[in-house]
Image (tube, grey):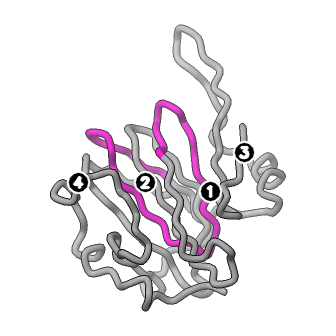
Amino acid sequence: MKFTEHDIKGVWLIEPVRYGDARGYFCETFRQDDFDKAVGRHVEFIQDNESFSTYGVVRGLHYQQGPYSQAKLVRVSLGEVLDVAVDLRRSSPTFGRYMAVVLSADRGNQLFVPRGFAHGFAVLSETAQFQYKVDNLYHPEAEVSIRYDDPAIGVDWQIAPEQRLLSPKDLKGISFATAPLFD
């Protein structure tokens, strides 16, 4: 696998090496020792999650606060999404900035989003199956949703506003200015 750290420190783009022939391909999608060596620390993933969505769905910007925060390793096994991570670490030189990358099943690329970030994605293909590993269990009382269209962040979701499909929870997200942050 090829690991490339984003200019927002701690966020890593991971590209698998695929071995293919006329039958298809094989690749490793996760290997703990390579991951630990590349990112420079051990992250113990304890749960795998999956969602299925249609074109225009925007999920996020979500995170868990305090001791319930989560690091995520995300990938797409069907379709294509725009994946977004927002730096919520006050001490970071990139505090308040977001990064976005297209993740697709065709490329098999992945994104590691460490603790201290809000995360979301928008479905760019007809449908998408999104999978992610987390290093902490979900605690609903610790969940925070920042409004997906907060102008202080300014995410370009690459989906026309009238085509965006959002949950009631995401429509009620709080502003970046009032969001609990990380040190």
Q: Residues within 10 Å of mark 3 (few under 14, many from 20)?
A: some
Q: Which mark is residue 183?
A: none
C-alpha separation, residue under disc 1 versus residue under disc 2: 16 Å
Residue under label 1, please give it: 112
When asked about the image quadrant of residue 150, the answer is bottom left
Q: Is residue 156 above or below residue 52?
A: below
Q: Would you say 39 lies left or right of 94 here?
A: right
Task: Indicate which disc, 2 or 4, sits on the residue closer to the N terminus.
Answer: 2
The amino acid marked with disc number 4 is Ala
C-alpha separation, residue under disc 4 versus residue under disc 1: 27 Å
The amino acid marked with disc number 3 is Phe
**Boundaries of the magenta span:** 102-131
Majority SS type along the magenta span: strand
C-alpha separation, residue under disc 2 versus residue under disc 4: 25 Å
Task: Indicate which disc, 1 or 3, sits on the residue closer to the N terminus.
Answer: 3
The amino acid marked with disc number 1 is Phe
Residue under label 4, please give it: 160
Residue under label 3, please give it: 3
Q: Nearer the viewer, residue 13 or 64?
A: 13
Q: Nearer the viewer, mark 2 or mark 3?
A: 3
Q: Position of residue 69 (x, y in %)?
A: 58, 78
Disc 3, SS: strand
Task: Indicate which disc, 2 or 3, sits on the residue closer to the N terminus.
Answer: 3
Residue sitting at x 58%, y 11%? 21
Task: Indicate which disc, 3 or 4, sits on the residue closer to the N terminus.
Answer: 3
When asked about the image quadrant of residue 8, the answer is bottom right
Residue sitting at x 24%, y 65%? 166
Residue under label 2, please give it: 50
Q: Nearer the viewer, mark 2 or mark 4?
A: 4
Task: Indicate which disc, 4 or 1, sits on the residue closer to the N terminus.
Answer: 1
Q: Position of residue 23 (x, y in %)?
A: 52, 12
Q: Residues within 10 Å of mark 1 (few under 14, many from 20)?
A: many
